[in-house]
Amino acid sequence: MKVTNLDIANLEEIVGSLPAREKALFQRIYAISTTTGELHPPQSMQPWIRQQFGSIEAVTKQKIVRVTNTVTYEGALFNRLRNSRPIEAKDKNSLDAQLLEASQKDSFCYPEENTPEDFFGRVAGKHCVTASNIAKYDGLHGMVIFNEFNPLYFSREQVIDYIDVAWEWAKRAQAKQPQAKYLFFVWNCLWRSGASIYHGHAQVMLTSGRHYAKIEGLRQAALSYKQNYSSNYFTDLFQVHHSVGCAVEKGGVKILASLTPFRDNEVMLMADELNLSLKERIYEVLACLRDRLGVTSFNLGLVTPPLSETEENWEGFPVIVRVIDRGDPSSRASDIGGIEIYASSVVSSDPFKLAQQLKQCLG
């Protein structure tokens, strides 16, 4: 029987209704379990519960869906009710007001004067310029400083330029240090994402020896999957998302609303190379999150296979981009707690609703 209500709460039923081959492929990668959390509130709490959550019934029996990727061991616990929980620590100043205040003391306004340059110089694009990060993550660690102060004021042309400049930075860095082959690009947008400076900027790193730990872990997991099933993990990952309605493909780029998001509204993009189509899809996803879902703070990470030959096997590993929503910038409460650090992600957004928006935006 086909499930008509496509919702994360119904994931078990959706998977159960798939054709046998698609169901087996899904279960090869994901394990799902559903439980109910029950509670009995005192009479004195009931008016507040109705106001905060809509009804008493909404909290007395809460459906929780647990999804685990048994290849990579990423996992998420879904409970939409957590989106309505009270957050007492709120900043009263609006986002626009905070950005306006920050712009008055903007150290990135004149990057050539106020930031150091890398030992191989700066890379300048139409909409950005590089600098050397003054407190480095790694030996080769630069910044891409946007000409536009507000990181949410981005266009298609600007996003493409940011990535192109980061790529040129990586090529120049590798020309000086050929053993550095592993590229990582990250865009932390506003303070909720961990950005210490509000002016729009991204960071780019090139490391040696092996890729960063989580990326190397993903490569190893994909290799084990290939050995076990004679199939490409990333191709199958897209296929299982597509089979339940959580993926779309455009211009050779595979776009997934992740079933095991690290935080809310996680989107994954995969492509064979860092080409124009992928850069355009990155812009379209970011614009969709900003304009359709109201996302104002996010983390974007972009990883490529090594820039030159390595001893280890990277066959079938695509260019991967991941984007997550970091929540309301006016909230002073962190969106990451002990359970996310030590156990599993806890998520209130619905990948099926996110997929719906992505399909509409990407056409």
Image (cartoon, rainbow, N blue to C red):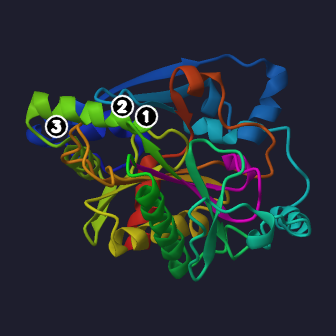
Residue 16 drawn at (x, y percent): 22, 35
Density class for disc 1 (Cα within 10 Å; few <14, some 14-19, many ≥20) is few
The amino acid pointed to by label 2 is Gly
The amino acid pointed to by label 1 is Lys
* Label tally: 3
The dot on residue 25 is 3
Residue occupied by mark 2: 217
Residue 87 drawn at (x, y percent): 79, 38
Please say if the residues under marks 2 and 3 sit with CB atoms less than 8 Å apart: no
2 or 3: tag closer to the N-terminus: 3
Quadrant occupied by the C terminus:
bottom left
Q: The magenta stretch spans which residues?
A: 181-204
Quadrant occupied by the N terminus:
top left
Residue 53: which quarter of the image?
top right
The amino acid pointed to by label 3 is Leu
Disc 2, SS: helix
Density class for disc 2 (Cα within 10 Å; few <14, some 14-19, many ≥20) is few
The dot on residue 114 is none
**Identity of the residue drawn at 73% across and 36% down:** 334
Please say if the residues under marks 1 and 2 sit with CB atoms less than 8 Å apart: yes
Q: Nearer the viewer, mark 1 or mark 3?
A: 1
User: What distance separates the C-alpha of mark 1 from that of mark 2?
Assistant: 5 Å
Residue 348 drawn at (x, y percent): 57, 40
